[in-house]
Amino acid sequence: MTIPIEAKKALEEALGSENVSDDPGVIETYSYMNGLGSGATGYWWARPACVVLPGSTEEVQKAVIICNQHKLRFKAHSTGWICCALATSKNCVLMDMRRMDGLEIVEPDGYVITEPYATAGETQVEAMKRGYNPHLVGAGPNASNLASATSMQGTGGTSVRTSMNERNPLAIEWVLPSGEILRLGSLETPNAGWFCGDGPGPSLRGMMRGAAGNIGGNGVFTRIALKLYPWYGPPYECEGRPPFFKSKALPLGYVRYVSWKDRDLECDALYRLGETEILDYSNRWSASALMSSLAISNQDYREMKKKGELHKVFPNGYWTFFFNANSQRQYDYNVKVFEHIIKDTGGTIIDPRDLGDPAYEVAIQNAVRAQWIGKSAYMPTGSNTGVPPLTYETIDQCMKFSLDETISVKKEWIAKNKIYNDGEDNAYACLDENGHFLHVEHAAHSDWAEPEAEPLGIILKGYGRALEKGLGPAYMSMPAGWAKRSEYSRYMVQIQRMIDPNRAADSMLTNAAETMGA
Amino acid sequence: MALSDYHYEMSHCHRCSYCKFIPFQLIKSKRFSYLCPSITLRNFHSFSAGGRAALGLAIAEGRLDQYTEMMKQIVFECTMCGACQVQCRTFNFNLNPIEVMQALRTHFVEQGEIVPEHMFVIEGLKREDNVFGEPKKHRGDWAEGLGLKDISREKVDVLLHVGCRMSFDDEFWSVLKMAVEIMQCSGLSVGIAGSEESCCGGRALEMGFEGVFNTFAEAMAGRVKASGAKQVVTLCADCYGTFQEHYPSHGWGLDAEVVHITQFISHLIDQGKLKFKNKIPLSVTYHDPCHLGRRGEPGVQWKGEYKRLAPHLFGPVPEKPIRLGRNGCYDAPRDILQAIPGVELTEMERTREYSWCCGAGGGVLEAFEEMAEKTAHERLLEAEATGAQALVTACPWCERNFRDTLDSSGGSLKIYDIVELVHQAMGGE
């Protein structure tokens, strides 16, 4: 769709002509995405009508009001690391938030005030200098911390310590789809600062994002204060040559790979490890994922797979556990407790260094900075379609029931070459809040260039299986889940209708709802 | 390779935005975390490696029915510094952004979509064999009275290839003379082509004029062969990168070892042929020229295609060389600086494979003044943040752009070619 001349002119006056473009070349580059979901839909998505680069909350507000006036939709877009960041309506003004990349660590209160384009990795670097650590979303250090706290999911390996990112927002500045600016929590009270999301002032954090976010449907979050957690010891640093570099020693840091032969015992260990509260990072993945991280080409990956050495070491997936202690005494205690629990549950502890320096670097760089998770997710085929049930549930529910269901669904698809044969169990998982919950996603790789590729069906099949078995697929914000579980999404839609009378916000969730007649 | 030959690669960008940042493991501050000068200036994703891959894909698939001025700006307002290539390639097996961007430029030129300012360079090359269009007969003026051997008359051990910038920008002539004095410590016979020297062709290639590049590459190969030189030494990082990467990757070889002046000097120090008499009490920081560092990594000509290795698993057959910039020239200049008595080297946050560009390359200096100046200014700020008194580099294009930017922006930082410090330390005037 071509943007009306009057609307473009108004946007140029509000933001500066250099920050507005409807050039075909520009909007084309914002309609491409190969990665999450592209195997199902292809790598071209909707072309936005226009792309704008707001530089402040006030400019965002002006742009939103213009969209309302001209019956255009809008969506905020940060580093673009997921298909949900793209326009899903053709009359969408895509707001690339790159000019809003501010980041301020507030001491000694221990929070960060961040704008949309400040990444999790950058936040961590600045936080660690001051003895803090932020939540890092599993998608990686390239993801916006603001986005994962307000608009989409927010789980990661650090969640065992830092919780899902929905629990970290303090005060928030929010441009509603109507164009009003809403300031939540302490920010609404003059001179009170950013320290609290629950007041003095309105607390609407639950409404703001629900369980997993409305992926652009609730407006634009322009600034947010996020809780930080302690980081003991020196800031993490790396040096050396690409691709793996070399981490500088963390004197009281401890990272290990662990695997179990028995799933029940694995679950027992996870509950017990959570109860001890010693972990700073937990992440389950597979031999295939580790090979994806370690390989430097598809041929290299193929050779590793052919040799099968990592599959022999980790036939049932493996966990990466990490902690960074605040004293030698705590370190010794943590190691003792950790080793006792693993031994008691029949697990095998592997020092990543025993698998070579790159394997160690992958372990420590994931544990501290979520560095290689994204590579594992998309290599070697280029795209990944998660197999439902993507769960955020108890450890038992995830590990004893959902995981096997996803493996079963994957087997069917692999047998028909519809997705890549990655060894079937390629489930990513992380503990949340010291084991209160577990989050599981199951990777299903495919390449659009493969003639028999058909990953879309696996999503629907997975959701169907989840409902059939009563497993409760959690991520109902995903459009494919909408058809299967509409009551959750109705709340999200009702909230959006209340704050978005002109239906100006462009959300994959609510677009899917409309498509399906909800 | 044609743009369409990169279809698989262009359609396998993950849209991760890694191409916009230095590796997240290496970031030392939010202030200096960005990697790509192009998107840092323009902010639209289109101006990143990922954006350009998407644009190339859209063109290859016929999704765009016109070429706009903005599209031309997207393609050409980039210094071709190659930082995106190094960062992307650590994360993605299936995309080589710098090759895609080169193919895009060649495609645009083939379609007649040319940056007018670049034509001044191309016309100059065609008419006078140099990028400035200066009279060719003056190319060797800098060497008058030095008694250097003329390779058109006699064989030499070492051919000193001067390059367009140093030949015609007389502010560099003193540096050239110092370099000659240093090289004579080797005891080898050093010669030049003088007025018969021509451009390496690298600038033409990076502006998208592959045919012009091939003409100059062929001439250079012939000249080196005729000289009998065992080494081609240059002070220009742009020429060095062209000889190292572009020549082999386009099927051109020089029958001699290509050596940058920093490698030559470092070798002299190691051999004990160069001694430093003077102490230079100076705190410095070093700027890695892109075409000496990551783009100085030797290139390899690859002819093949992406094939299905297994269901859902594709790869280049034969295997494509993996370019991570690791084999560029990074240590020689640092070894030299550390060997000079009194010089204290402090690194900037973005160094080596992930050095921030000076802003002069890829045809930007000639056509996109704002980008050239802002990119250089950003680097000068980074250098100042180290607390160093001086910024040292090893490329006349970088130095020119830094000096000009400093003139307009102000600041107390001194700019040196590394040769100047070596010459001072060895007792030269």
Image (cartoon, grey):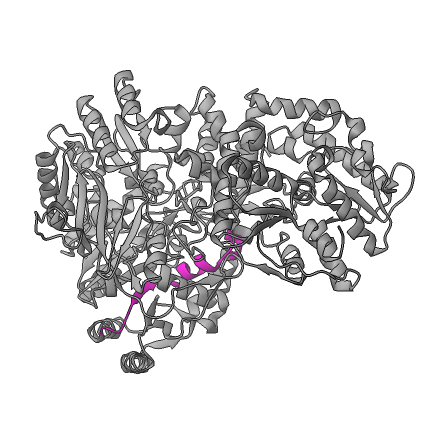
* Residue A443 in view here: no
- Which residue shows up at 30% across the image and 25% down it? A49
* Rendered image quadrant of residue B15: top left
**Residue A57: horizontal and vertical position, in percent?**
23, 37
Nearer to me, B251 or A13: A13
Q: Which residues are magenta?
A: A277-300
Inspect the magenta stretch and tell me whether residue A149 lies in it: no
Lateral position of residue B314 relative to residue A87, left or right: right
Farthest residue, direction right: B153
Is residue B334 placed above or below A72 in the rendered structure?
Answer: below
* Rendered image quadrant of residue A260: bottom left
Lateral position of residue A391 relative to residue B11, left or right: left
- Which residue shows up at 68% across the image and 61% down it? B279
**Residue A275: horizontal and vertical position, in percent?**
19, 74
Is residue B108 placed above or below A485 in the rendered structure?
Answer: above
Nearer to me, A258 or A325: A325
Farthest residue, direction top: A5
Is residue B427 placed above or below A490 in the rendered structure?
Answer: below
**Residue B312: horizontal and vertical position, in percent?**
43, 47
**Residue A428: horizontal and vertical position, in percent?**
31, 59
- Which residue shows up at 22% across the image and 73% down it? A277
Image quarter of the N terminus of chain A:
top left
Lateral position of residue B285 relative to residue A132, left or right: right
Numbered-mark total: 0
* Residue A234 in view here: yes
Inspect the magenta stretch and tell me whether residue A278 lies in it: yes
Image quarter of the C terminus of chain A:
top left
Nearer to me, B335 or B428: B428
